[in-house]
Amino acid sequence: MKISILTLFPDMVRAVLGTSILGIAAEKGKAEYEVTDIRDFAAGRHRQVDDRPFGGGPGMVLMPGPVVEAVEHVRRGHEPHAVTVLLTPQGRPFDQAAAGDLAAKPGLILICGRYEGFDERVRETLNPLELSIGDFVLSGGELPALSVVEACVRLIPGVLGHPESAREDSFQGEGLLEGPQYTRPRVFRGLGVPDILLSGDHEAIASWRREQAQSRTRERREDLMEPRAG
Ligand code: SAM
């Protein structure tokens, strides 16, 4: 999958793309990253990308010209079915199901905002998928874009060493939270490990894990127990 990120802070993004699973995905040829500096598409000696809001108010707004031209340039290097994603707290809440859908696309083009966000005509011109990573406001779209990229890339077949680990993660499959997990030592500060996990009885362990996932989900995220639409 080809993944392009458009940002005013390319170094911030590059550092993460080369690390851990994202770096491994690139080494395995499963993901290809391209980072574009929106400022390269700004006109004039000062390479201005933002300006004061019409109508007054605090802060600066990203001008439509540099953002739209940068995206149009990047789109020319992508498959026609690549998805353009605009990161905004006003977008559709990003979740595991959306990560699964995006992981199956041939390409992603992610646009990171800054300052007070984008001139509305960016949306009108590019018609992107607008995604939010939660009901809080960050100063820029870089961390949201990297969150989307990491959630998607780890679902691309062949990226994770153990594909079943992603299948058993929270929100996958039946959409429950994963239950408690243990590793060595068997006793830590007086706290033991449930006997069943040491029993070697794989069927009993699987059914214990399922019960734990259900009770943990009921306890922490009752909303996930409700049948999903569709
Ligand atoms: N004024 C905007 C509003 O109220 O909707 C918020 C702008 S925010 C300070 C700057 C940029 O950070 C946004 O354009 C967006 O790209 C990114 N951003 C901040 N919070 C986000 C979130 N929860 N999800 C996705 N992107 C976010």
Image (tube, rainbow, N blue to C red):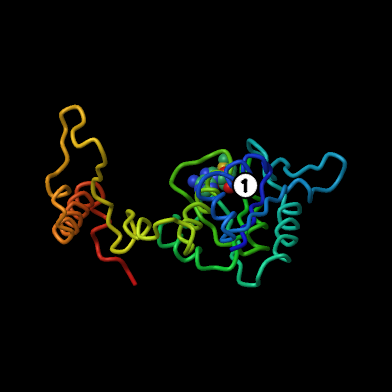
The image shows residue 46 at horizontal and vertical percentages of 83, 39
Q: How many marks?
A: 1
The residue carrying mark 1 is 113
Q: Residue at x 56, y 52 (%)?
A: 87
Q: Look at 75% across and 57% down and name the residue there.
A: 69
Residue at 47%, 56% in the rendered image: 154
Q: Is residue 45 above or below residue 199?
A: above
Does the rendering let one see residue 55?
no
Q: Position of residue 34 (x, y in %)?
A: 67, 54
Placement of the C terminus among the 4 image quadrants: bottom left
Corner quadrant of residue 48: top right
Decide if residue 229 is on the left or right side of residue 12.
left
- Disc 1, ligand 1: is the CB inside 8 Å? yes
Q: Is residue 90 left or right of residue 60?
A: left
Spot occupied by residue 23 in the image (x, y as percentages of width and height): 57, 49
Tell me: residue 104, above or below residue 16. below
Where does ligand 1 appear, by image quarter? Answer: top right
Q: Nearer the viewer, residue 84 or 178?
A: 178
Q: Look at the numbered disc 1 and give the secondary structure of its residue.
A: loop
- Quarter of the N terminus within the rendering: bottom right
Residue that extends furthest to the front in the rendered view of this protein: 200
The vertical placement of 208 against 106, above or below, is above
Residue 102 percent across, percent down from the top left:
50, 64
In this rendering, would 120 be left or right of 37?
A: left
